Image: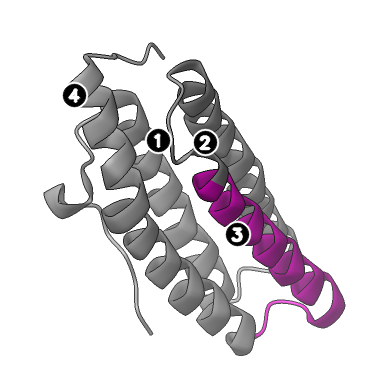
Amino acid sequence: MRKIQWDESLSIGVPLIDEQHKIWIKHLSDVAVAIEAIQGPRRVAEALGFLLEYTGTHFATEEKAMADSQYEGFDEHRCKHQELKATLIDLEGEFKEDGATHILAESVNTFMANWLADHIKEVDLKFGAFLREKGIVLAG
């Protein structure tokens, strides 16, 4: 099972977004731990709910910054966000239907860890470079 932890290879050089990524990664880990430790449906639901909510918050931050800065890759980047939101909704539906299963834990850990690391290192890094090149600083 792949787990993701914050390290400097995930930094895009934009403090606000890097901080949000750290929070997101921590809560992704919380969901996996809650499922693996069989902490009960309520705890798993709380952790998964926070992950879903925070994903929306984080994506809104990035998308607003992209729109405000007229980032050329905005539409493609937003598409990737929408795909992830749909997958998270599916995972939430799986939890509601089947409960906190090991299959769900595996799905959350593997898919999200892979998606997040790849997305940050490939897609967000380009956006971070764009912001730094333009001298744009995001306020939190």
The residue that label 4 is drawn on is 133
Viewer-side label of 1, 3: 3
Residue 58 circle label: 2
The chosen color scheme is one colour
User: Which residue occupies 60% across, 59% down?
Assistant: 84
User: Which residue occupies 15% across, 53% down?
Assistant: 9
The residue that label 3 is drawn on is 84
Amino acid residing under circle 1: Gln
Upstream in the sequence, badge 3 or badge 2?
2
Mark 2: few, some, or many residues within 10 Å (few <14, many ≥20)? some
C-alpha gap between disc 4 and disc 1 = 21 Å
Which residue is at the far bottom?
103
User: Which residue occupies 39% across, 71% down?
Assistant: 114
Left/right of residue 79 with respect to residue 125 in the rendered view: right
Mark 4: few, some, or many residues within 10 Å (few <14, many ≥20)? few
C-alpha gap between disc 1 and disc 2 = 7 Å
Left/right of residue 40 with respect to residue 34 in the rendered view: right
Amino acid residing under circle 3: Leu
Left/right of residue 92 with respect to residue 31 in the rendered view: right
Viewer-side label of 2, 4: 4
Mark 3: few, some, or many residues within 10 Å (few <14, many ≥20)? some
Upstream in the sequence, badge 2 or badge 4?
2
The residue that label 1 is drawn on is 20
User: In the image, residue 99 lies at what x, y percent?
Assistant: 77, 78
Residue 115 circle label: none
User: Which residue occupies 65% across, 52% down?
Assistant: 82
C-alpha gap between disc 1 and disc 3 = 16 Å
Secondary element at tag 4 = helix
